[in-house]
Image (cartoon, helix red, strand yellow):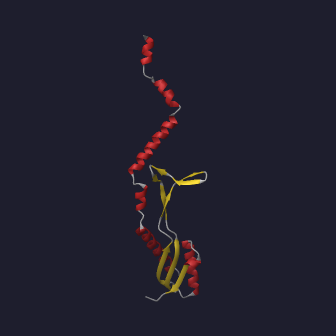
Amino acid sequence: MEKSEEKAKPLDGGRIYQFLKGKMWLILAAAAGIMLLLWGGLGESSDKAAEGFTLSSTEEYRQKLSEEVKELCAGVKGVSAVRVVLTLEKTEEAIYAKNKTEGTESVASLGGEGLLLGYALPKVQGVAVVCVGGDDEAIRAELTELLCAALGISSTRVHITAGKIS
């Protein structure tokens, strides 16, 4: 009778522990994966986050940058009544994580959606400055050098001309 009682007995704590001991990393990885899935479902989806950056935010970025360039130019001796027009290469670019394997590359995804890492701001394509003092060759050279350094563009993408006194 003792043998039949041992067979009907459920696994004791020691045997369960021994079974799970070797697979603890697997259990922790599964728990972490489930937490990531739940956490990802609570926030916005990647597509909804990408919708947050629109043409208006690109325009706001361009206007803010134009104001900063205007203030920078107005700070140069002999320059006043500054107007600035900036052109950008494109709108914001969404940066997604990528899976790389030998010879191939694909967008990493979780639950069918790309993993959004962030956004790259658009680069300045060119700048035009109209200002009082823009007819002076030395001022034009100073402003061109200043704008090339500040915006990270070549001198062929900068144009400075004289404006009228307001």
- Residue sitting at x 42%, y 68%: 55
User: Which sits in the foreground, 131 or 24?
Assistant: 24
Q: Residue furthest top?
A: 1
How many numbered discs? 0
Find residue 124 and report its horizontal and vertical position in percent.
52, 72
- Above or below 122: residue 147: below
Q: Residue furthest left?
A: 42
Q: Position of residue 107 (x, y in %)?
A: 51, 54
Farthest right residue? 102
Q: Residue 74 at x, y = what percent?
A: 49, 80
Q: Is residue 103 left or right of residue 117?
A: right
Above or below, comparing residue 38 to residue 10 in the picture: below
Which quadrant is home to the N terminus? top left
Q: Quadrant of the C terminus?
A: bottom left
The quadrant where residue 10 appears: top left
Give whichever of 145, 155 is nearer the camera: 155
Q: Is residue 77 visible?
A: no
Question: Residue at position x 47%, y 75% from top?
Answer: 66
Name the residue nearer the viewer: 148 or 28.
28
Which residue is drawn at the image coordinates 40% and 69% (left, top)? Answer: 56
**Taking the image as drawn, is residue 24 in sight?**
yes
